[in-house]
């Protein structure tokens, strides 16, 4: 490609990114000083726990771990409340896509930056992080393995990454970079001991409580809170003067009533970053026939299930229309978010009655009968005369077990027998189904800013953190490769949605719903934007301010 054509291609990509609200080709962050000084204030924040002390690259890292790391380590990009990645600024001053052929990204490090142990932060630290990341068997390492080389220049202030093949989600890289020789693995003691370089430093840490204090050398958001206490407790503070904010991925009636009746806090119900799903095994003789997968999927009255679990809480999620995107994400193809419990949910996807996304118990009976399955008095029988019994693996959460109960009830109403097997983790549930030890599984699949993370369940090495499905289809792999190499978000999204459709239409996954989230904050706090994940919630903390007394509660 000529230089002129290359520059033109970069311009097209930049315009496409900008048109969808993505950062263009640079991560330079703007800073707007606040009007008040919050350095003397302490903020109490509640997040799901326990805190494990994992680094961003550890497979066991939770969303809360990632959120904490965002506040104490440097990143090229962080997450806006809308789920869009934006340049973080700070120690990694910019990240610029300078070429598409080959893909080249230049990272520039701000001068005079030091880790909390006094060691200078340079571009060599980014190279060290790349070398460490690319060796890991993790989906978080995919992009690092796509980088063929990294070269440091400008006296340690720049690092240029040249990719072996196109990797359009390069903005996911160099998040929560740890210091060289910092201890890896999941340990809350190690988390407290690791060098930091972010808006906050770690003062103390336990699995249920982390105390952060302001880094006086951090150049951005100088008016941020001087002390932030992050806890797993969801109990509202007794004193109305306590500055408080909480993000929860579970919603129950007691909490909703408590928050709505407390004049010291405001609250809202949104969408969490995950998809509650039924996944079906490609290696089980029971679910190998598509007729069985269709029947098991169609038999579930999803909106009725959702209404039973959440309807009493005033708001309930809509039945899912995507296996890749959770309902809080901008590219979600159906109706997003939560709906009042007394409204009817409809899909915005055309031809829902023919693409398999509707719920139809009668259709489940018809498809089984049409494919030679026979219904007896209390069970179904295969064309070979064997009793049809579905082995259902169930994830560890209370929600997983509640959902599984209603799924088995819906199956039983049609005479489909099942036997449930609890699993210790969501990943173990996915692995049991992928390996054929279970015919189907109920679990929450996490989603992040890019659909490539969720799509990896169906493509490439089956690392545990891909939530492996065991499904490998040539058409799906081609769509993944097309999307990951496309720098135009609009056309890349089209490929992701086609992949999404193929997986759902073959009934390897039956997405059920995105669990709701609950956000609570003191009426004294301003500019608490709605979000869908713990990282994008906690990333806001440095920008929050305390309202003057005259405006509080107005």
Image (cartoon, helix red, strand yellow):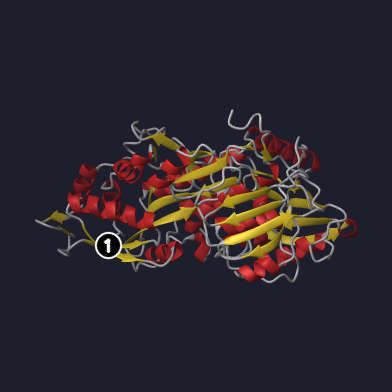
Q: Residue at x 51, y 60 (%)?
A: 466
Does residue 328 lie above or below 465 as drawn?
A: above
Residue of label 1: 286
Whether residue 538 is visible, yes or no, is: yes
> Which residue occupies the extreme right position in the image?
155
Does residue 406 lie above or below 468 as drawn?
A: above
**Residue 378 horizontal/vertical position (percent):** 12, 57
- Of residue 315 and residue 92, the one placed in the foreground of this image is 315
- Of residue 89 and residue 259, the one placed in the foreground of this image is 259
Q: Quadrant of the N terminus?
A: top right
Q: Mark 1 falls on what kind of element?
A: loop
Disc count in the image? 1
Q: Is 439 positioned to the left or the right of 322 in the image?
A: left
Q: Quadrant of the C terminus?
A: top right
Badge 1 density bin: few <14, some 14–19, many ≥20, Cα 10 Å: many
Whether residue 168 is visible, yes or no, is: no
- Of residue 139 and residue 461, the one placed in the foreground of this image is 139
Can you tell which quarter of the image residue 257 is in?
A: top left
**Residue 390 horizontal/vertical position (percent):** 26, 61
């Amino acid at each position: 490609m000529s230089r002129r054509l290359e520059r033109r291609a970069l311009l097209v990509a930049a315009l496409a990114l900008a048109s969808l609200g993505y950062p263009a080709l640079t991560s330079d962050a703007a800073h707007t000083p606040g009007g008040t000084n919050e350095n003397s204030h302490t903020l109490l924040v509640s997040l799901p726990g326990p805190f494990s002390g994992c680094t961003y690259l550890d497979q066991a890292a939770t969303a809360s771990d990632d959120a904490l790391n965002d506040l104490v380590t440097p990143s090229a990009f962080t997450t806006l409340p809308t789920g869009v990645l934006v340049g973080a600024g700070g120690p990694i001053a910019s990240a610029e896509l300078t070429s598409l052929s080959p893909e080249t990204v230049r990272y520039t490090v701000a001068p005079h930056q030091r880790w909390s142990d006094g060691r200078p932060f340079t571009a060599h630290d980014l190279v060290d992080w790349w070398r460490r990341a690319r060796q890991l068997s993790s989906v978080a390492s995919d992009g690092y393995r796509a980088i063929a080389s990294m070269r440091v220049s400008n006296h340690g202030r720049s690092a240029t990454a040249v990719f072996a093949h196109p990797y359009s989600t390069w903005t996911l890289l160099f998040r929560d970079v740890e210091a060289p020789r910092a201890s890896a693995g999941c340990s809350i003691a190690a988390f407290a001991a690791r060098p930091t370089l972010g808006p906050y430093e770690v003062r103390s840490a336990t699995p249920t409580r982390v105390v952060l204090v302001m880094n006086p050398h951090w150049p951005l958001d100088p008016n941020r809170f001087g002390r932030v206490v992050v806890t797993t407790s969801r109990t509202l503070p007794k004193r109305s003067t306590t500055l408080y904010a909480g993000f929860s991925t579970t919603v129950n009636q007691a909490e909703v009533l408590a928050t709505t009746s407390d004049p010291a806090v405001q609250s809202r119900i949104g969408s969490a970053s995950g998809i509650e799903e039924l996944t079906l095994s490609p290696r089980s003789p029971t679910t190998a026939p598509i007729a069985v997968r269709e029947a098991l999927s169609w038999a579930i009255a999803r909106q009725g299930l959702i209404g039973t679990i959440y309807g009493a809480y005033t708001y309930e999620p809509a039945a899912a229309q995507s296996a890749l995107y959770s309902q809080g994400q901008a590219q979600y193809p159906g109706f997003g978010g939560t709906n009042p419990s007394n409204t009817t949910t409809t899909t915005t996807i055309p031809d829902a009655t023919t693409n398999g996304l509707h719920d139809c118990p009668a259709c489940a009976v018809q498809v089984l009968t049409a494919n030679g399955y026979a219904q007896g008095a209390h069970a179904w029988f295969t064309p070979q005369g064997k009793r049809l019994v579905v082995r259902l693996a169930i994830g560890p959460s209370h929600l997983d077990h509640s959902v599984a109960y209603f799924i088995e009830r819906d199956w039983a109403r049609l005479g489909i027998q099942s036997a449930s097997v609890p699993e210790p983790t969501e990943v173990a549930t996915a692995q049991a189904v992928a390996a054929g030890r279970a015919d189907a599984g109920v679990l929450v699949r996490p989603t992040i800013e890019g659909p490539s993370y969720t799509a990896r369940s169906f493509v490439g090495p089956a690392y545990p953190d891909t939530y492996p499905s065991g499904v490998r289809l040539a058409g799906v792999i081609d769509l993944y490769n097309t999307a990951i190499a496309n720098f135009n978000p609009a056309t890349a999204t089209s490929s992701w949605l086609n992949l999404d459709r193929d997986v759902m239409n073959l009934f390897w996954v039956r997405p059920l719903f995105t669990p709701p989230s609950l956000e609570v904050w003191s009426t004294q706090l301003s500019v608490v934007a709605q979000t869908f994940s713990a990282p994008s919630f906690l990333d806001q903390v440095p920008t929050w301010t305390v309202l003057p007394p005259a405006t509080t509660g107005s």
